[in-house]
Amino acid sequence: MPYHHILVAVDLTEECHPVMQRAQALALCSQAKLSLVHIVEPMAMAFGGDVPMDLSMLQQQQFDQARERLDSFAGTYPQLATEQRHLTYGQPRQEIHRLAEDQGCDLIVVGSHGRHGLALLLGSTANDVLHGAPCDVLAVRLKKS
């Protein structure tokens, strides 16, 4: 059964290229539309939500830098139109699920380090995305750096 719309969730590290390349190959085989998403997490989440200062200016700078990095990353994939690039703000699992549903995606592709032990217990974005996803999820195994 071919896929029609594939959503690739990336963290914009160098490790994202194999994830994107796998998604591209699937899209080509299925003649599917390909979309890309990066999620900027709220800074307050990193500090447990208990921050005694206004982080809005830092958050905007982080968002602007993420936009530049996303455009640079996507620029290496010329077939990926600007309207197929999404930058959102929030909790990764929720935002990926929301976008996949809103865009009518039938496959989400994410990278996975295949963590074991304590890292597995603490969870990962790939594991998070898998649970409750509105469609199929492909976790592309990334090589350890």
Image (spheres, helix red, strand yellow):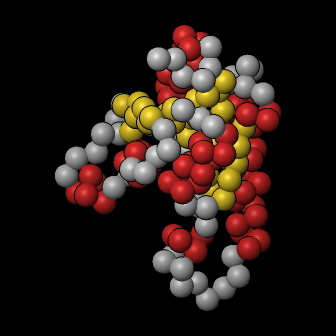
State the residue in front, 38 or 84.
84
Horizontal relation, residue 21 to residue 76: left or right? left
Q: Quadrant of residue 77?
A: top right
Image quadrant in which the C terminus is located: top left
- Residue lying farthest front? 1
Q: Is residue 21 above or below residue 100?
A: above
User: In the image, what residue occupies the spot 67% across and 40% down?
Assistant: 103
- Residue lying farthest left? 117
User: In the image, what residue occupies the spot 50% across and 44% down?
Assistant: 134
Residue 38 screen position, x and y as percent: 62, 46
Horizontal relation, residue 35 to residue 49: left or right? right
Residue 20 screen position, x and y as percent: 56, 27
Horizontal relation, residue 112 to residue 119: left or right? right
Q: Is residue 61 above or below residue 126?
A: below
State the residue in front, 103 or 21.
103
- Residue lying farthest top? 29
User: In the image, what residue occupies the spot 70% across and 82% down?
Assistant: 54
Q: How many marks?
A: 0
Residue 67 in view of the camera: yes
Residue 69 in view of the camera: no
Q: Is residue 136 above or below residue 120?
A: above
Residue 141 screen position, x and y as percent: 36, 31
Horizontal relation, residue 60 to residue 11: left or right? right
- Residue lying farthest right? 82
Q: Quadrant of residue 36?
A: top right
User: In the image, what residue occupies the spot 47% across and 17% down?
Assistant: 1
